[in-house]
Image (cartoon, grey):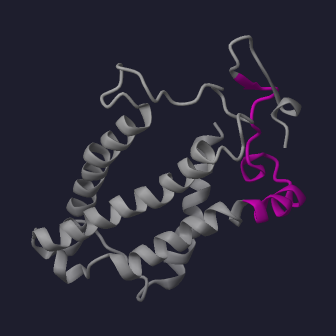
Amino acid sequence: MDDILYGARDKRGNWTPNKRPERAPIFVWPVQPKKVIRWLPGYFLPWNTLYFVISLVSWIYLTPALDTMREFRADWILLILLRNAGLTLLVYGSFHFILYIQRRQETNFKYNAKWPDTDNTAFMFGSQTAENVFWTMCSAVPVWTAYEAATWWLYANSYLPYVDFGQHPVYCAILVLVMPVWRELHTSI
């Protein structure tokens, strides 16, 4: 796919799309059922299905039981920290490997045609990628884990309402389908 068909590069090499992204048809009024039906496969496949599978596997195999999380203990918090670090490496690392190491897409659709610096004293380790990895793993993942651990503790101690899939499968299934729509609403405005 050639990015020049969908946009242009300025004299610095920065890419700009020809037109603004359109709203998802589910948010267009009056409702256009044919457009919504044509949009649905792209809504589910591949990304939202992949995110759902990753979430489901994480939930079933890599999240401690709710009873375990009634007290703040290092064992279950460390498990969540390691899971989050692993997910970060898996997801972002996969994108980085394909787009920046293998450069499969070259600079197509890359807003800034310049590649990350590898020998620049402005970055902590001289490398833009190494600095990004450091701050992601040593700052973002621990903060994410702290919020998640606090939330699980609040659920486990009934300070926040917890909806169990086993007791409310239809409600939970609807929530799973609505979450990506909620995200789409915020990205299409």
Residues drawn in magenta:
15-42
129 vs 183, left or right, is: left
Q: Residue at x 43, y 37 (%)?
A: 129
Give above or below for 124 relative to 41: above
Residue 103 on the magenta span? no
Which residue is at the front of the view, 107 or 146? 107
Q: Residue at x 86, y 61 (%)?
A: 38
For the image shown, how many numbered marks are present on the structure?
A: 0
Name the quadrant containing residue 124: top left
The structure residue drawn at horizontal position 32% and vertical position 73%, both measured from the top left corner, is 162
Residue 53 in the image: state x and y as whole percent. Answer: 54, 73
Q: Could you tell me which residue is drawn at 72 percent across and 43 percent down?
A: 105
Residue 158 seen in the figure: no
Residue 55 image position (x, y, % from top left): 47, 70
Pick the residue in front: 11 or 130: 130
Q: Residue furthest top?
A: 11
Q: Is residue 150 shown left or right of residue 45?
A: left
Residue 46 figure quarter: bottom right
- Residue 161 occupies which quadrant of the picture? bottom left
Give percent across and percent down for residue 120. 41, 21
Q: Is residue 135 visible?
A: yes
